[in-house]
Image (cartoon, rainbow, N blue to C red):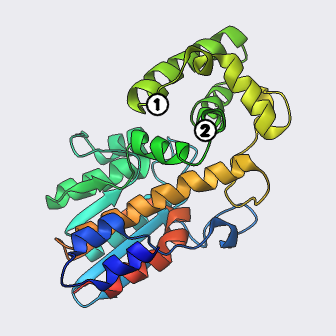
Amino acid sequence: MLLIFTLWGCKNTFTEETIAQTHIYPTTSYLDIKLDSNGHLPSNPYILSFENGKKQVVFCGVNHLTDNSDIHNPMFARIEQHFFGFRPDICINEGGDVSKKQYRSKDEALLQDAEIGLTKVLCDSLGISSVNGDMTDSLEFKALLAKYTKGEFLVYIVTERLMWGLKGEGISDSTVIRERYHQFIRNYIMQKGRVPLTETEQDFGFYQSNYEKLLGRPFALRGLEPTNPFDPNGKFQEIGRSSKEIRDQYLLRTVDSLLNKHDKVFIVFGGWHLLTCEPGLKEIINRKR
C-alpha cells in the first residue's frame, strides 16, 4: 500500500497510464451491498452517471436474464435509450471480446448474446468500438491461485462454470458428467486458462474430494452449493467473492485507461459490479480532466 500511495503522489513522474496499472481502486464489499430479497437491483437496468467536466461515464448495471428468448424485455429498450441519449465515444461490455462479431439483425444479436450482442449492435450503429471489460481467464486464474490451493480453485471454477450448466441441462449420467469434466479441465482450465495440473489434479476424484473437504458434504450434481458472494459463511463463497473482486479491479483499470483517450464511456455490465465499483468510478472521474 505504501508503494501505491508513493506512486500516487509522484504526479510529475508517473502518468495516468502508470497509475491505472498499479493502483488499487476503492470498492464496496459484496458483504455490504443491499439488494432486495431476490438479490435484484433497484431497477433493471440500474443506471448511474459519473461526470467531471467533459469526462463522463454512464454505467448500465443489469440483472442477467435467464431466458435467452426474452428479446423484448424492457431492459434492452432502456439500454438502447440511454445509449443514444449519451452517444458515447467507446463502450465496455462484459463477457469477452465481441469486436469482430457481426450480427444480421438486432434480434439475432439479442438471441445469441443478450445485452452483450445489443451493445455491439449499438456501437456498430455509431461506428465506435466496444471493449471487453473482463480479464482473460488465465489472468484471473493466476490471481486466484495466488490465494487458494489448486483443489480449492478447481472446486469453485468447475462448480461455477461447468457443473451448474450440466445441472441445467438435466444431465444425470455419471459417465457423461466425467467426460464433460475432463474436456473442461483439458480445454478450459489447462489450455485456455494455462493452469498446469498433474494427472492426479486432473482426475475427477480430485475434484470430488476437494469439494467434500471445502463444503463438508459429498459432491452431488442435484445438491450443488449456490455461489452467493453476499453470504459471509464458508470458503466457497469467499472464493466467489475473490473472483468478482479481481474482475472489479480489472474493470476499473479499463475505465481509467479509456478515459485517458476518450471523454464519454458507456458500460453495460452485471449490476453487482456497478454497486461494488461505484467508489472506484467516483475516484477515477474526480481526477480526470
Looking at this view, is 200 or 286 the one in front? 200
* Pointer 2 or 1: first along the chain: 2
User: Compared with residue 180, is residue 128 higher up or lower down, i.e. above or below?
Assistant: below
Q: Is residue 185 visible?
A: yes
- The residue beneath circle 1 is 195
- In the displayed image of the protein, which residue is found farthest to the left? 127
Looking at this view, is 239 or 133 the one in front? 239
Looking at this view, is 66 or 107 the one in front? 66
Query: In the rendered image, which quarter contains the C terminus?
Result: bottom left
- The residue beneath circle 2 is 153
Q: Report helix, strand or loop for mark 1.
A: loop
Q: Report helix, strand or loop for mark 2.
A: helix
As shown in the figure, which amino acid type bears the numbered disc 2?
Answer: Phe
- In the displayed image of the protein, which residue is found farthest to the top? 175
Specify few, some or many for label 2: CA neighbours under 10 Å numbering under 14, 14-19, or 20 or more: many
User: Compared with residue 89, is residue 107 higher up or lower down, i.e. above or below?
Assistant: above
Return the x and y of residue 212 as percentages of the image width and height.
Answer: 80, 31
